[in-house]
Amino acid sequence: MARPARQRREATATTAPAPRPETGGEAPGMSRATGRLSFLYAVLFFELGVNLPFFPLWLRAQSLDNEAIGIVLAAPLLARIIANPLVGALADRRERLNAALVACSVAVVVGTAFLAFARGFLPILLLVVAIALAQGPLIALTDTVALRSLKGLRSAELRYGRIRLWGSAGFALANLSAGWLLDWLPASSIIGMLTLSALATALAAMAVARVRVPEVSTAPVETTAGRGRPNLLVLTIASAALVQASHAGIYGFSTLHWQSLGISGGAMGSLWAAGIMSEIMVFSVLGYAVRGPTGAVVLLAISAAAATLRWAAMALDPDITALVLLQLTHGLTFGATHLSSVFLLVTFAPRGMVAQAQAWLAAGWAGAMAVLTALAGYAYASWGEQIYGLMAAAAGIGMLLLVPVATSLRRGGMLPLLIACEVEQPPENLG
């Protein structure tokens, strides 16, 4: 009787799939994917790091007034409401994901180059909308590639954060370098910076598309809590979208306001970089807290509260010292919001619709940000920094929308009092 039992054990040992190593010894495909994804995030967000703070300066140099600038900044956000869900539906089909990523990145290069020849409100508006139709889905597509590459690995949240932080690093580098260059170069050089960074993004997307990540033979236990609960999914998307959209004021008009106060381009770049450095810290360490819906919901609520307080303080037109301190909260108001919402959507979205859920979130905050940007554009001339009162209200509503989500999870026995209950010790080597 002992021999058959031993044979069964040997057979089991022979046929059982080998677990994927958690630390070190990653498959070459995974190692290449991690490096190339990190570089893609870096150059993709470098472009955004030039665009968000300094593109309004180029628009001003084209003799556009505050209302026109508000419309130009809001219109591409509305275009993304259409583009993101459509491309997200394609992203859920693995064979089309890489093609969509490359096609969108190449289209951004072409559209951005043509901006150098655009003159007047309408041509600029049409080109910016066309660029947005391709650029809008890029972040959601890149997130989907990253999440699929990490699928089945323990500490996937932390690994994602460690890859995503390179995007924040690229954004901060763009803030500093572009701000410094604009102390010496005219505003027209902004389009050249955007075109070169868009070209680098397209090349990085092509490199990522060539990597084939091996399928993971074993996967962690997947919680089914929240699956098939569209109410939780909708509330989470609405909450995160409002918190992210509340950044419309600082994205669209902070640089213009700081310039009117006599703050130099280098100092403005440093203010933006300070916020991004705090974001890098969040992506580096808070992956430990985003394990399952418990940590994610609590972290998202903290982020919404921090955003509400940040914009309320910005409405008081703080001095440069207070501005630095407020910028350091960006890691919570943006970084932690992004990190927690990405993994909540993975939990709540129906199987096979994760990319679409991410696209819905991107479309949701794009729509909300378009409305807030347009309102800020019309109100900025008379309100000034008081436009941040609108942003505080949006973030506060987002925080309130999380109450039923947290209540639902707690009734299901999923919401312990402390996030620390779910914190896992970090692996020695993340590869």
Image (cartoon, rainbow, N blue to C red):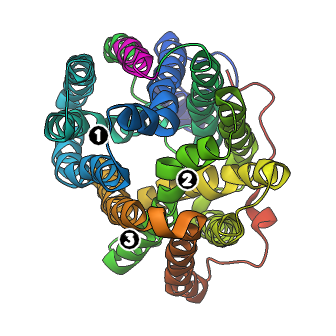
- At label 3, counting other C-alpha atoms closer than 10 Å, the crowd grade (few under 14, some 14-19, many 20 or more) is many
Using the numbered discs, state the Cα–Cα distance from disc 2 to disc 3 in whole angstroms. 28 Å
197 in magenta: yes
User: Disc count in the image?
Assistant: 3
**Any mark on residue 233, and which?**
3
Circle 1: element type: helix
Measured Cα–Cα span from mark 1 to mark 3: 20 Å
Query: What residue appears at the point 28 percent right and 46 percent down from the top-left corner?
Result: 72
Of mark 1 and mark 3, the one earlier in the sequence is 1
Between residue 359 and residue 124, name the one nearer to us: 124
What's the magenta region?
A: 187-201
Rendered location of residue 161, percent (x, y): 62, 39
Taking the image as shown, residue 377 lies to the left or right of residue 246, namely left
Q: Which residue is the site of mark 1?
A: 137
For residue 347, which quarter of the picture?
Answer: bottom left
From this view, report whether residue 76 is shown above or below residue 241.
above
Q: Nearer the viewer, mark 2 or mark 1?
A: 2
- Identify residue for label 2: 250
Front residue of 193 and 357: 193
Q: Secondary structure at mark 2?
A: helix
Give the amino acid at mark 3: Leu
Q: Earlier in the sequence, mark 2 or mark 3?
A: 3
The image quadrant of residue 364 is bottom left
Image location of residue 22, percent across then percent down: 65, 30
One can see residue 127 in this view: yes
